[in-house]
Image (cartoon, coloured by chain):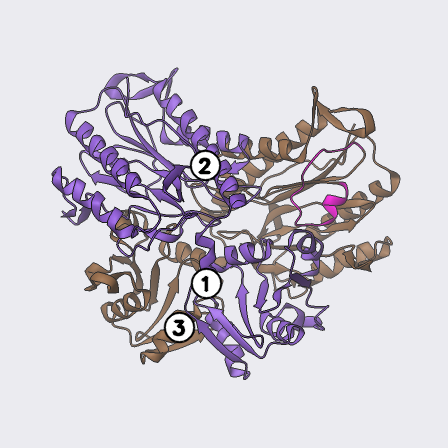
Chain colours: A brown, B purple
Amino acid sequence: MNRLTGLILLSGSSPSTTNIHYLSGFTAPDAFLYLKTASGGWLCVSPMEKARARNQSTAGTQVFTPQELGLSGKKAWNYVEQIKALMEKAGVKRLQVPIDFPAGFFQTLEKQGIKISIDRNPTCPERKVKDAAEISKLRKSQQAAVAAMKSGIALIGSSKIGKNNLLYIGREKLTSEKVRQLIHKTLIDHDCAGVETIVAGGDQGTDPHERGSGPLFAGQSIILDIFPRSEKTGYWGDITRTVCRGPAHPELKKLYIAVKAAQLAALKMVKPGICADEIHRNCCEIFEKRGFQTLEKEGRHVGFIHGTGHGVGLDIHELPRVGKSGEVLEAGHVITIEPGLYYPGLGGVRIEDTVVVTEDGFRFLASCPKKFELL
Amino acid sequence: MNRLTGLILLSGSSPSTTNIHYLSGFTAPDAFLYLKTASGGWLCVSPMEKARARNQSTAGTQVFTPQELGLSGKKAWNYVEQIKALMEKAGVKRLQVPIDFPAGFFQTLEKQGIKISIDRNPTCPERKVKDAAEISKLRKSQQAAVAAMKSGIALIGSSKIGKNNLLYIGREKLTSEKVRQLIHKTLIDHDCAGVETIVAGGDQGTDPHERGSGPLFAGQSIILDIFPRSEKTGYWGDITRTVCRGPAHPELKKLYIAVKAAQLAALKMVKPGICADEIHRNCCEIFEKRGFQTLEKEGRHVGFIHGTGHGVGLDIHELPRVGKSGEVLEAGHVITIEPGLYYPGLGGVRIEDTVVVTEDGFRFLASCPKKFELL
């Protein structure tokens, strides 16, 4: 980017919101603009946000209100006018925007004769490699996730098995909702927020994005997938465990053992220089060898139906992907390793840890036991 | 829209994500496409989401995976290819997109010769008027907000006033963080999630978007702004109260009384047919008459520095706005009324309720006492 070109980001879409947070240190609930130029960053925020933006933004970021850019009346609330005023203030003549920039404003700027083009590269590829401060923030979120996981598993483990294999705490049926509530409260005690946490038993667990609801049963696999966001730093954690209250059917146990083996094998492959899709392919092979096919059955995809992992940072899903279109891992990448198997009628199993790629391998961000049967 | 034109939405940006949720009944953490045509809705989701999408989507919505649309390999993961395949399946020849559709995909579609234009009108203006089922969902979220508010205020009210006016619970200093934790836990008990809840005392409260941190003090105004999202329905609640532990300075009391008067006057004006900016102007006048000016002072905006309210639904901020660019209210609109005054050195006060516009006035979604001094 030369000094006459600026990259403009508008918060409110993904991943521009977190890119602005990453670049400027500032974020806000309402949409606002950020201009990145060769000489630094330029925020345009409402008068209400000005003081906070000045306090929170990093060195090299200048904060303006629309009024300070010379806009008044209705123009002050118009993003296109704000962009043009920011360009003038920053002395740039050409604009780039990321793919997720709103088409409506893109078209208006173009029609008004602004030289604007789309930069199809990731806006902040440097986000993939985390520095020590970021790793420390991610570790705290992961520690919160582990504490919440332990509280959830302890609750399931303490349940009594009643009629029809229903689980009970005292006289009340234990439900996905109750386990999720406890998990969320534990996250709050660790300054994190949990949303969409998965506690899915039996066939519910065979849909990896099903959050789970209703009573839990003995003998079924229960997937707990917890991904808290720190209320302080905005960084995420991500962990999954699968448990079974009471003894599991031998076939279900085999499923668990296969996933655990694939996850361990995958973790062992994590190091700088490896292509992430090799790790994914290895998981697939381990499953195939053990007879766990991935295919379409009665209109549903069963088996290993998602990628092996993803980057974690200011977004819960960010680069690098650990899947078919994987990239070469580098030291400082923070990724999940989370193979899983899903067979309606039998159950779902997923085991996930978040790790940082080190010079010679990987390190868990936080450790958490893996135990399937809670007897 | 004629039968050869379709409107395409991609989740991941605001407000398209919630528009898809509103139109199709389905939402998911990862981005996916929705095509709206004269004959119905067409979802394109990953194989992993298919079963859930079919279960959750409303009548008239058809669900496809990229593979079912004839895409394979890398093409299956490409939104532009998915859009073209959806168009073919739905038999539409022209596309419209909302303002927030990603510019990158817009440009690619245009370059590939697709007839595509930007619809600059709100995608779902009908979202403004809530039906009985929606109002019931909003009421539940608002009831959760009220319960959480009561728990937070009770905690502040139960605190002891110690040295330097610090507030204590037992031997521990009462902080914004502790009040927020209790509020969030109460929300969890009501199946809601609270994020970015504001508990801001003294000068922190004079920045309306400052969440608040650190010890709370007697004699200062403490703003509590709670906006929970139901984990079940996705609908939001929104409430603000301002309290003061111990007696307040007479000037601060005047501030509170002015805001309370403005809020009551604003509520009384709420009815179908009124232009929302009249309500806002009336708040401004009440403040001016009582000597509470809105102006810039030492580089900061002070006084009544935000709008009077906003719509609430599947988004926490949605239409109609209750501010300068306000619209005419209609029965079924659900809006907040939340005037506030902010003076660094004195404090901030905001009082907010969420109400539904009825045929002859308004109804609170849930009621919550207003009491400033907790003596």
Query: Where is residue B139 drawn, in percent x and y?
Result: 48, 38
Q: Is residue A210 above or below residue B158?
A: below
Does residue B330 appear to the left or right of B220 in the view shown? right
Are marks 2 and 1 in one subunit?
no
Marks 2 and 1, how far apart at CA: 39 Å
- Do the residues under discs 2 and 1 have CB atoms within 8 angstroms? no
Seen in the picture, residue A117 relative to B149 is either above or below; the reply is below
Query: Can you give x and y, in whole percent of width and height, for residue B46 in the image?
Result: 67, 61
Q: Quadrant location of the C terminus of chain A?
A: top right
Secondary structure beneath dot 1 equals loop
What residue appears at the point 21 percent right and 30 percent down from the top-left corner?
B257
- A168 and B237: which one is in front? B237
Image disc number at residue A124: 1
Determine contact: label 1, label 3, CB under 8 Å: no
Chain letter for mark 1: A
Q: Residue furthest front?
A: B360
Left/right placement of residue A192 relative to residue A339 reads left
Disc 3 on helix, strand or loop?
helix
Magenta segment: does it hold B302?
no
Separation of marks 3 and 2 at Cα, in angstroms: 38 Å
The answer as to whether the residues below labels 3 and 2 share one chain is no
Dot 2: element = helix
